[in-house]
Image: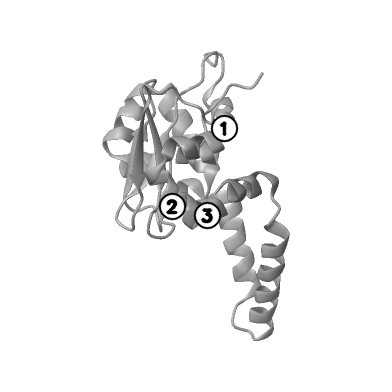
């Protein structure tokens, strides 16, 4: 687990994976099984139109608009759709809110169910068997490995994402951000904070 988390931060395994993907892509194109333009469109979709920026917009909106926050917690699908996000792997969304006394984190214990429309594709560590097992059995230790050190009094709730329900964590808004507008707040929100393995901090 620690090694996989470390890989995520230092990007050590990326080159090997990218090399394999490029070879597979070249083979599929050569055999005319896929259209390069279709591949480019898919990449563009997940890099620019689907992904963590969408989720960050949802979080920032909830931070500045209490009515929207209430709608998000009551019916995440409808609230997320208000901002124009939705689609495959995001059909059944639930939003859970971090508070000073409760910290939420998300895992998929069976495979890698994940809300693509608001978070993009799942990171490698999220799919790793070690994270999937340990997030349930020892969540506090896992969070510490990600750099999240919580007081013992803080309750940790682990949500198991499935094909039927996918979760989005609404992290706490950091202090001293009253001067920031919605767009600037969205820039503070990371993918990991919406999975629950990171917190949001104001930039200095």
Q: Earlier in the sequence, mark 1 or mark 2?
A: 2
Q: Find the distance from the CA under tag 3 to the CA under tag 2.
A: 16 Å
Q: Are marks 1 and 2 in contact (CB under 8 Å)?
A: no
The quarter holding residue 19 reads bottom right
Percent position of residue 172, x then y: 44, 25
Compare residues 79 and 127 and report the one nearer the observer.
127
Q: Do the residues labelled 3 and 1 touch (CB within 8 Å)?
A: no
**102 vs 52: above or below:** above
Percent position of residue 29, x then y: 66, 79
Residue behind mark 1: 147
Q: Are marks 3 and 2 in contact (CB under 8 Å)?
A: no
- At horizontal 47% and vertical 57% (from top left) the residue drawn is 129
Percent position of residue 132, x then y: 43, 52
- At horizontal 61% and vertical 68% (from top left) the residue drawn is 39
Whether residue 45 appears in this view of the structure is yes
Question: Label 2 neighbourhood size at 10 Å, few (<14), some (14-19), many (20+)?
Answer: many
**201 vs 170: above or below:** above
Question: Label 3 neighbourhood size at 10 Å, few (<14), some (14-19), many (20+)?
Answer: some
Residue behind mark 3: 121
Q: Earlier in the sequence, mark 3 or mark 2?
A: 3
Secondary element type, mark 1: loop
């Amino acid at each position: 687990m620690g090694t996989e988390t470390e890989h995520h931060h230092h990007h050590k395994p990326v080159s090997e994976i990218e090399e394999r993907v490029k070879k597979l892509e070249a083979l599929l194109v050569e055999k005319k099984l896929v259209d390069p333009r279709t591949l480019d469109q898919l990449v563009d979709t997940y890099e620019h139109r689907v992904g963590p920026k969408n989720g960050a917009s949802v979080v920032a909106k909830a931070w500045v608009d209490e009515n929207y926050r209430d709608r998000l917690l009551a019916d995440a699908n409808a609230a997320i759709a208000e901002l124009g996000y939705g689609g495959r792997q995001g059909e059944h969304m639930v939003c859970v809110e971090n508070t000073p006394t409760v910290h939420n984190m998300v895992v998929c214990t069976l495979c890698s169910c994940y809300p693509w429309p608001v978070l993009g594709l799942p990171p490698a560590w999220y799919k790793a068997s070690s994270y999937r097992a340990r997030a349930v059995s020892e969540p506090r230790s896992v969070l510490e490995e990600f750099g999240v050190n919580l007081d013992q009094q803080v309750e940790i709730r682990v949500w198991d994402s499935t094909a039927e329900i996918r979760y989005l964590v609404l992290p706490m808004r950091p202090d001293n951000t009253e001067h920031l507008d919605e767009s600037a707040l969205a820039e503070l929100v990371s993918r990991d904070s919406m999975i629950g393995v990171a917190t949001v901090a104001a930039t200095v």
